[in-house]
Each structure stands twice: as C-alpha cells, then as structure tokens.
Image (cartoon, grey):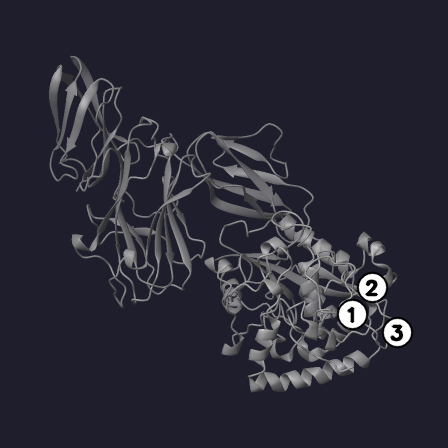
Amino acid sequence: MTIKFLFSFISIFTLAVSPLLGQTTRPFDPTNAREGEKVEYCHQHIKMAELMKNPEFAAMYEQDKIAFEKAKNKAVPKGVVYKIPIVFHVLHNNGIENISDEQIYNALEILNRDFRKLNADTATVQSDFVGMPSDVEVEFVLATKAPNGTCFKGITRTMSPLSYQGADGNAQVTAIINGNDVFQNNWPGNKYLNVFICGEIGGAAGYTTNPSTWSASSMTNGIWILHDYVGAIGTGSTGASRALTHEVGHWLNLDHTWGSNNNPGNTSSCSTDDNVDDTPNCIGVTACLLSANTCNSVNAYWNYDVRDNVENYMDYSYCSKMYTPGQTARMRAALQVSNTGRFNIWQSANLTATGATGDIFLCKAAFDADRTTICQNDSIQLNDDSYNEANGWTWEITPSTGWSFAPGSAATSQNPKIYFANAGLYTVKLTATDDEVKNNYIRVLPDAASLPYWEGFEAYSSLANLTNWEVYNPNNNNAWTIENTTSHSGSQCAKLVNFGQTPSNIDELTSAPIDLSVIPSTGAVTLSFRYAYRKKIAADYEYLKVFVSADCGANWAQRKTLAGNNLSNLTSSTSWKPTQNSDWTTVHMINVTSNYFSENFKMKFRFEGEGGNNIYLDDINLYAGAPSDNLVLGIDGLSDFQDIQLYPNPTEGDVHIRYNAMKNEKLTVVITDITGKTVSTSQVTSKEGSNLIIVPTDVFSSGTYFVKLGNNSKALKFVVK
C-alpha cells in the first residue's frame, strides 16, 4: 500500500513563510459538516492543493513521505508510553471563548482517556470490531515551564479581537506570541504540542497538520480548535468533546477513515484509503450510522465484507470511541521521525526542559478575583490559582480597615469572599509558600456622584490609580491618560496615543457610579461628550463605543458606536492633536432609558484601534432633560431651593449662585476641593424668593471645586481657571 502523507483535517495549514498558506473563510459547505452543525470539519483538500503549488514545500513533501515509509517499516515497541508536553493557548476577547481552567483540564482528561483506551464505551463497539480498540500508549502532560524557564500552569491567555478573526491562523498565533500572559515569543512546535483555543477559526471546528519538516519548529505546528469543541463542560459538550482526540490523530499522521479528502459521502472515496489496513474503505459519515457499509470492503486484512468503522475517532460520527491497532502503529511510527519534530518532543531532555515530567510541585502562588471593581458594601470572590500545588494559603489586604471576610471565609481560606465598606484602592497579597502581590488590585468606588455630572479631566495629573476613573489597557501599551496641552474646555482632557501602536488594541475608560435614581421613570437623561480624532490613513476603520450599566458594571449594554468615517473621515500621517474647538465633535446620547435610572449607573468609553491616529475625550456631561450644546452644570428643584443656577463656569473671577428660596433661613455655604478638603465656609441669610450669592475665587488655585448650600442641597461643581 502506498504511503500517502497528506495534511489532514480540520485543516487549514497556515505558516507565515508562504502566502500560499493563509486561511480564508469560505462559504459554508454542509457536505463537509457533521449533521446539524454549522461549522465545517475540514478544509484540507483545498489547502493541500495550494501548498503543492509551492516548489519548496513539494520537495519537502516527497522527502517526508520517504521518512514516514521507513518509520512505518520499523518495529515500534509496545509497552513504552510516550509523554508529550501540551500547552493550551486561550485567545479570547473577554467573551465566552475565555473558557475556564476546569474546562481545559476536562478536555485533557478526555484526550488522555481516549488515547489510553480508558473509555468504557470501547466495550460496546460493533461486532465487526470487537477486540480491536487499541491503547495508543501516548499521554499528554501539561507543560509547566515556558521556553525561557518561567513556571506556569500549562495554560496561557491572550486578549485580542483576533479570537473571532480566524481567516488567518498566522495572525492569531502572532497575537498569542506578542500578547500572552506567560512568555512573549515562539513556543517551538518540536518542544510543545500547542493548542490554540479561539472563538472563530475560518469556518472550521478545528484544524491542524500532519507531521512535516516544513513546520517542525514553528509554533504553527499545532492545533486550532473552537472553544465549544473543548471538553464536555463549560461551553463544551459531550457530542463535541472528542474533536481534540480527532485533531491529535491528524497531528500524529492519521487521515480520515475514508482517505485524504475532506468531504465525507463522496463515493469516489471507495477507491482510496487512509493508509491503514485494518480500517475498512468507506466514504465517511456525518452521523452515527452504525449499519453503514458504503464500500463493501474486502482487502488483505479483511477477507470478508465488513461494515464501516463508523465508531472510529477519524470519522465524523457522533459515536466515535476507538483507534485501531493499525492507526496506533502509524501514530507511534510518526513519533520516530526526527525532522518533523515529533521525535524530539517526547525525549526525556525535552520533558525536563518543558516541565512535563509529571512531578507535582508548587512553583508560583497566583490568584484572581471574580471582579476587581465594585461599589461600596459589595463583595468579591478571591480565587486561588497557585500552580502546580499549594498546601496552605494566607491572605493579606492593605489597607487593613474598610473590609471584612464574609461568614465562612478567613485569612487562611483557599478562596475567600470579602466585603468592602469603604471606597479606595486595595492591595492583595497571597502567601502559599511563594508570594503573589497585586498592588491596587481591588478598586472600591466612591459614593455615587449627583446630577448634573461633568468631567473635564481638570483635576488630575494622571488617570492611574484613581477610584473615580478606571483605565483598562489589556495590551499593556499606551493607555488613556491626561493631556494638558490641548482641550475643548478648561486646560486638560483625556487622551489615548493610538498613533504607532500595534493594530488590534482595545482601551477603556470607565466612570465611577453616578446617581440617576432621582430621575422619575417618565423623565429623560442626556449623556453628552466631546471627542477629537483623526485617522492615519483613509483605510483605517476604528471604533469608539459607549456602554452603560445600571448595576455598578456587573452588566453592560452598548449604547453608541462611532466607526470608520463616522468617527472621522479626516487623516493625518503624523501623530495628531486638536488645535482648535472646530476639531472637536459633540455627541448627545438620549438612549439612556429608565432601565438605567439607578443609584449605581456607570458609563464606559471603549476605543478599538487598528494602528490609526490619536483620540481625545473631554466634557463628559450627564444631565436631566434634552440635549444641550452648552455644559449643564446647575441643579434645579433641590429640596428647599428652586431654580439653582451657577455661573460663569468655568470662571476666571467670581462665581454667582442664583436660587429661589422657599422660606427665610440662615444657610452655611461650604466650598471643598476635588479631594474633599474644605477651603471656604461662610454664613448667608436667605430671603423667601430670589437670592444671589457671589463667591470670590481670587484666593483659589486653578482646579475643580464643589459648593454646597445648607444641609438640603447637593454639591455643585465649578472650575476655576
């Protein structure tokens, strides 16, 4: 039988070294999918045809066929269990594709169960194949050392929109190389079996390549798979849980049971086979058709007509449960070929270098939390992520006051729950033999601000480590910061230096809570803001999105999207900043509906960049009523007062406060700075009817201040230039 060394499965073979290897998302082909599914299992035949147009690949392909022919003819001893270091790289965009560690561990357990024939369903195979399910004697062990020796848990995580842009697998791998949380460089394919878990991979459920000199040491010598085809828990399912078993079969040089093409059900497949004698020729199935006998197989191994081996892992059925002895021999032979990298991967020296010896030891204390930004009197759940094994835990939180452990939790709990009563930034330290400290990890937000709310970014020299604004910068590059050389009003604004950044950035700026509960359900609220932006080139397509939340950020709803030319159709080839007010655009949002009239309303501004130019934000203004092109800073109808007006604002001289009093009374006028420090206190006597208070500001430094009249009003904000 001629060896046919073809790239298989779910397979789109993509490497940066050749333009022929780029993936494309094709129209869905139902003949290449399992019954009832909306993703294809394989694109191998198309990509193989493209690859063979490359003379360099074609030459290597012929040499690889010779090497596998020799390996096939060698006796590969049974009883030797090969261990393979495996790493799961989760490429996510903060969605459901960011699957849990537990789901990955479940997938690894299923993979090892299937390869060691520990699955109980091997006892129920069809009568033609009784006694044939085979123990491959290959085990997959989580690597615990990165290529630079860094200790980790065998899982990396990378946040990138490319999780759902699977038309180019190379781009997804590059995103992982540049942005993962463990080691930012190549993870060689001859040292690790790299599994890339994504949200979308070019229209397939998963794909890989057969062993090849072409990609031996490349990180792309791995497996791509959708998150919902990983394991049987979380986003996974029992029906899809053996997709990884199927893919690893391809990675170890198996074809589909019907041969090297990717479309089951093609009657021409009866004239080809999978280069394994004990798998009957067939045309393949897309459902559990146990009685299928599509090719009337009789060959040197089967001297009588047998049914199709539908229950084989390399078919498309939903009832796969076995490899045959012939498939096992072929996979074990693949591990003997050195120039493809498969021979090196199981060697003792590589197992030691990658930390895949199976020894359990604690190499790092680690933890995370279910959320890191909360409102006062709310709680968080701390989760121990120490790897690879911890025997005890001690938690320390600084400052030491303003919080408490929930009932049932203590400083020595593995996963304690903690309530926070006071606003501020809290540092968390876990000691579990080793220490992990996360400074300013928990942000407890201040009391909700009142309406009208205005943010001109005048009060800050930096946006880092504030409680009332949270900066999210997952790529750890340029983040939202303060710009003090330009603005729309005042002298400062918020800026994101997007010019020159690597494409596919996400940056967010999130407010503290604002009290909208004072607005009646029949009322109206306007959210206004101003932004300035330029593209770098006309083809740039970047996004500014606005989200709102009624529950302190536990849930978000997108309420505004500005993208492409709607964001701006102007360009600047150099790093840009606005120089005049006409460079700014004012946006009024009137879709903050009564569903969000809560005391813990929050808003979030997200910029999604692709390497364009800079963007600036100023004059974020939230107020009751219809849109206004002028800043709304006064408050109407407060308790004992009516029609309060504060002007001019900003001011370079006196501040005037005009109001109508409901009765004659003495009032205390208190002025505080942005930190809450009292800078002025005075007494006035209000008369029933119209009143005017003039507050001199010549003794105040430039900045933001608040003034409050008596005990029954809310603070009014004003700015001194």
In the image: residue 261, left or right of residue 297: left
Question: x, y percentage for residue 497?
Answer: 32, 58
Secondary structure found at label 2: loop
Question: x, y percentage for residue 287?
Answer: 70, 58
Which of the two marks, 3 or 2, is nearer to us in this view?
3
Secondary structure found at label 1: helix
Q: Which residue type does callout 1 highlight?
A: Gln
Could you tell me if the residues under marks 3 and 2 are in contact, i.e. CB atoms within 8 Å? no
- How far is the residue under mark 1 from the one under mark 2? 9 Å
Crowd band around label 2 with a 10 angstrom C-alpha radius: few (<14), some (14–19), many (20+): many
Nearest to N terminus: mark 3 or mark 2: 2
Crowd band around label 1 with a 10 angstrom C-alpha radius: few (<14), some (14–19), many (20+): many
Identify which residue, 428 or 579, lies in the foreground: 579
In the image: residue 350, left or right of residue 511: right
Residue placed under numbered mark 2 in the picture: 134
Q: Which residue type does callout 3 highlight?
A: Asn
> Where residue 271 is drawn, which disc sits there?
none
Q: Residue at x 48, y 45 (%)?
A: 439
Could you tell me if the residues under marks 1 and 2 are in contact, i.e. CB atoms within 8 Å? yes
Residue 226 shows in this picture? yes
Residue placed under numbered mark 3 in the picture: 303
